[in-house]
Image (cartoon, rainbow, N blue to C red):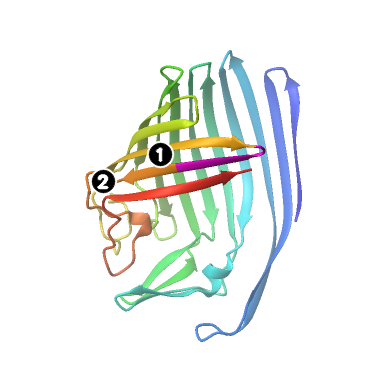
Amino acid sequence: MVFAEDDWALHPDWTLNLGLRLDRIGLDNEDSTARTEDSRTNTGSIAHAGLTWRFAPGWSHSLLAAASYRAPDIMERFKSINLGGGVMLLGNPDLAPEKSRSLEYSLHYADGRFSASANAFANWVDDLITETYVSPTRYTMKNVGKARILGAEAQGEWRLTPRHTLYGNVAWLTGKDTNADEPLRNIAPLSGLFGLRYDRGNGFWALGEIRCAADKKNGPDDVQDLPGWGTANLAAGYGADSGSLRHEVSLHLRNLLDRRYVNPLANSRGMTVLEPGFNAEVLYTLSF
């Protein structure tokens, strides 16, 4: 892989960013009961150009254009997964790399206590790699020809006091197989997160947040519609520095109301897989 990127200050308020990457990817699959021995090699390039304008104190916006490709990974080429209920998901050794063109606009604001950003993007993909329905007992990876993906995101953080911070984000996405004139599968529904965090200042912190998602009703005909969901979560922890290391222990309580829901991006064909109900987790984190 060869990669180059740089920023040019065209003006104190204008910055141009250019980047280029050239790479070669090789995959080898050993003989197994599911797939015979095989190998594939792909070469490609990725290029982008972005322009940022700081047009007022605390404000900036950016426009980015890019052309890229993505080689199928070894799982997409050679996997053989039993999804349960007699349904199999198979890879495809003959997948072609995805090629895409994208355009993204973003707006940013930040001052001492409040920061927010929003962006919208469009992505046009040739030879998109996705799971394709073959029969009631079989899905396979396939290049679908052409696809269009549109999306928007927004996030913000407001420091109400030196110890209290309100934060949140929301994301929306839609995708379409333009050859088949049908929605893409595995596109996330509208979702968001909203929370309040407390930092004591001595290493102790605590937060409460709500995660939610809208109904999932924009999939292909063979994909089940799913209702929206929301969960309430609490967490608290304590961290301390020791030399160049930081140690932290935290307790996380998730789905406090024990809601019954399904995540459409973590679902198995042929059966309904529920997400965990009320659960607790203790984590130890070492940072260096």
Residue that carries the numbered disc 1 in the rendered image:
171
Q: Earlier in the sequence, mark 2 or mark 1?
A: 1
Front one among 254 and 43: 254
Disc 2 residue type? Answer: Trp
Query: Is 82 located above or below residue 190 in the figure?
Result: below
User: Which SS does the magenta portion mostly show?
Assistant: strand
Separation of marks 2 and 1 at Cα, in angstroms: 15 Å
Other-residue count near label 1 (Cα within 10 Å), few / some / many at <14 / 14–19 / ≥20: some
How many numbered marks does the figure carry?
Answer: 2
The x and y percentages for residue 193 are 36, 37
The magenta span reads: 243-249
Q: Is residue 258 left or right of residue 44?
A: left
Do the residues under discs 2 and 1 have CB atoms within 8 angstroms?
Answer: no
Residue that carries the numbered disc 2 in the rendered image:
229
Front one among 197 and 96: 197
Secondary element at tag 1: strand
**Residue at the spot x=72%, y=17% of the render?**
12
**Residue at the spot x=45%, y=48% of the render?**
283
Residue 247 on the magenta segment: yes
Front one among 165 and 261: 165
Disc 1 residue type? Answer: Ala
Residue 62 on the magenta segment: no
Query: Is 156 located above or below residue 225 in the figure?
Result: above
Secondary element at tag 2: strand
**Residue at the spot x=50%, y=27% of the render?**
202
